[in-house]
Image (cartoon, grey):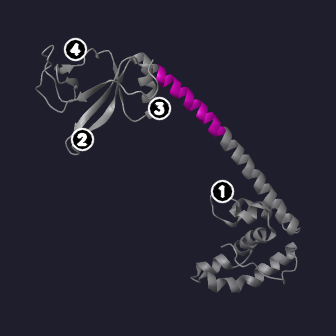
Amino acid sequence: MRNIGDKPDLVVWRSHKEGERCSACGKETWKGDLLLIERKSGIRCLECAGLGSLEYFPAGDAALTRRATAYSSRSAVVVRFSRARKRSERQGVLVEAEALARAKRECEEDSARRESKQEQRRSREAGAEARYIDRFAARILALLPSCPRSDAVAIARHACEKYSGRVGRAAAAKKLDPEAVLLAVRAHVRHRYTRYDELLGQGYEPFEVRPLVAGEIEDVMSRWGEPDRSCGQPAREQA
């Protein structure tokens, strides 16, 4: 058996001409035929070159190609000359049918193992995300005892959505920093309990609307039990 990564010894060409003949049997060749071309023996068809029993496998799956070539006692690279690019381009390989079948089985087994590992990883990540959302919601309720649980859960799910770029994905929020958590709450209140979205729909800009709804936000936050914020406001709030 060849070592994986060894190069095949032979190069077979895919013909782009018609009317040539095999130097051994005299059979006429056609465009697209696979031919062995050597300086001494000339053009030979695969049968006369002793490669007729090999199976062609097109390029595109590097792992499968490496394995099939390694398991095949005879193999050849299939190339074609590109007139447009003026260079020879690899098309695939010729390998023994048994070697190709074995390589396919092993690649399928590997694929199944990889998919199983990926599924386990996705399950672990989903569990971690769910636990983070639960902790975030619990932190909201600890900071704002009168906040409805349904709101706390909705805020956590929205703010902490993976890849969303929202405040819940920030480093401070992942540490359950009160300032970051309250930013998420205030954003929820702004959209859910004030005229903010309605005024935006009427053509106002966000910077015009925020001062108009600031009092409404403070009323809700006060009812939910937000502690005295007179010592300072957040530098930036979530949109």
Q: Residue at x 87, y 80 (%)?
A: 228
Is residue 148 visible in the rendered image? The answer is no
Q: Which region is colored magenta?
A: 102-119
Instruction: Give the residue pinned by disc 4.
Output: 48
Rendering coords of residue 129 (x, y %)? 72, 52
Q: Earlier in the sequence, mark 4 or mark 3?
A: 4
> Visible in this render: residue 141?
yes
Residue drawn at x 59%, y 34% as measured from the top left: 114
x, y (%) of residue 134?
80, 55
**Inter-mark Cα distance, 4 to 3:** 30 Å
Considering only order in the chain, which callout, 2 or 4, is on the residue closer to the N terminus?
A: 4
Can you identify the residue that label 2 sits on? 87
Q: Mark 1 against mark 3, which lies toward the viewer?
A: 3
**Marks 2 and 4: in contact by CB < 8 Å?**
no
Q: Report how far apart the C-alphas of labels 1 and 3 lie in the structure.
A: 33 Å
The residue labelled by disc 1 is 162
Mark 1 or mark 2, whichever is nearer to me: 2
Q: Secondary structure at mark 3?
A: helix
Which amino acid type corresponds to the residue marked 2 in the rendered image? Arg
Viewer-nearest of labels 4 and 1?
4
Q: Could you give the CA–CA distance between mark 4 and mark 2, rounded to whole angstroms?
A: 27 Å
First in sequence: mark 3 vs mark 2: 3
Label 1's element? loop
Report how far apart the C-alphas of labels 3 and 2 lie in the structure: 25 Å
Q: Which residue is mark 3?
A: 63
Looking at this view, name the residue that lies furthest to the front: 40
**In-image side of 117 versus 27 (left or right):** right
